[in-house]
Image (cartoon, helix red, strand yellow):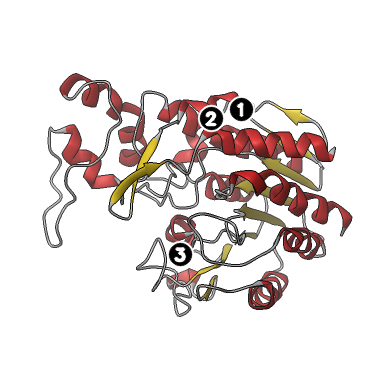
Amino acid sequence: MKTVFSELHALQSVETEFYRGKWVDAFEIPRRAELVLDAVRRAGLGPVIAPGCFDLAPVLAVHDAGFVRFLETFRDGWVNEVGDIPAYPNIWPPRRTRMIPTVRPGAELGRYAVDMSSPILQGTWAAARAAVDCALTAAGLIEGGENAGFALCRPPGHHAGRDYFGGYCFLNNAAVAAQWFRDAGAGRVAVLDVDYHHGNGTQDIFYDRGDVLTVSIHADPIQEYPYYIGFADERGEGDGLGANLNLPLPWGSDFSAWGGAMEQALLRIRAFAPERLVVSLGVDAFEGDPISRFRLQGADFAEIGRRIGRLGLPTLFVMEGGYAIAAIGDNVASVLKGFQLA
């Protein structure tokens, strides 16, 4: 299995973040990707390659054009008005307001940002584009005949919706790749999100479509980020009715509960009979994760990989969350090794 990795990920780097009412050391840091890369190499999973360069067409296939243009161009206006500092929203549009565009960068930031986790820096756009390129390059390996690929994406992507960003995510790498598979000829594609947090952006992008199945195993949004979305009764709408499956679990869930939910997810994927599978690979369900409250153990991640491998589908793994620095690399490598040994 080849891993696709870009050094440009490090252009998105902050020292602190606003977390539950206070500024703390940032959780989503470049070291995450570096440790995963080290573990992949130690495990001998296969070559590590650099991504190719893609144009914006695959991004615009799943994201609103105005939103993409905002991410691409916002920084210059912010620096001109505020200075070369991280860009955070200073206001969010209240309910029932008209959403008329303004001429102020801070106000426009509130139009698209859902939280304060994801400041826009000078290098944010380049890092986000490189993450997409990693996902598309790995998808291309699968279209070329390989049975699997790993896109070591950073920033992650599954919280980025059609026209919003947050949760450390700017562009939805997994969704871009899933749509690219469709455009390359796959009749049906499934996205399985195993991150601790609900893949709200991926659900948002495909919610009214029946050709892309979205399945997410995550902490119950009544308790956990991203809140407001990810409930079990959200099944899709219109042509997508029945093509969205949420499997929320309460705080404290261990692998006995999590594994049961995974069996439901795999049954639904088998019934959907996709030609390609995209896995949003977060490993923050780990018991030692500092911002999560599940209780999966290190050995459980190999079993996750084995179960995914038994589907027998061409599979693209796309890196999402995981913030237990000491364990993140081994947990990711365990999933990929388990897949290979299935």
**Residue occupying the point 11% across, 57% down:** 97
Query: Quarter-wise, where is residue 255 in the image?
Result: bottom right
Q: Position of residue 273 (x, y in %)?
A: 71, 68
**Residue occupying the point 69% across, 77% down:** 256
- Up the image or down, 215 lies above or below 291; here it is below
Q: CA distance from mark 1 to mark 3?
A: 30 Å
Residue 56 visible in rendering? no
Task: Judge from the rendering whether residue 234 lies leftward or rightward of residue 275; answer left or right.
Answer: left
Quadrant of the image for the N terminus?
top right
Kind of element beneath mark 1: loop
Which is closer to the viewer, label 3 or label 2?
Answer: 2
Q: Alpha-carbon neighbours of circle 3 within 10 Å: few (<14), some, or many (≥20)? A: many
- From the image, tell me which residue sits under label 3: 207
Q: CA distance from mark 2 to mark 1?
A: 6 Å
Q: Alpha-carbon neighbours of circle 1 within 10 Å: few (<14), some, or many (≥20)? A: many
Residue type marked 1? Ser
Query: Quarter-wise, where is residue 305 in the image?
Result: bottom right
Q: Which label number is shown at residue 6? A: 1
- From the image, tell me which residue sits under label 2: 9
Which is closer to the viewer, label 1 or label 3?
Answer: 1
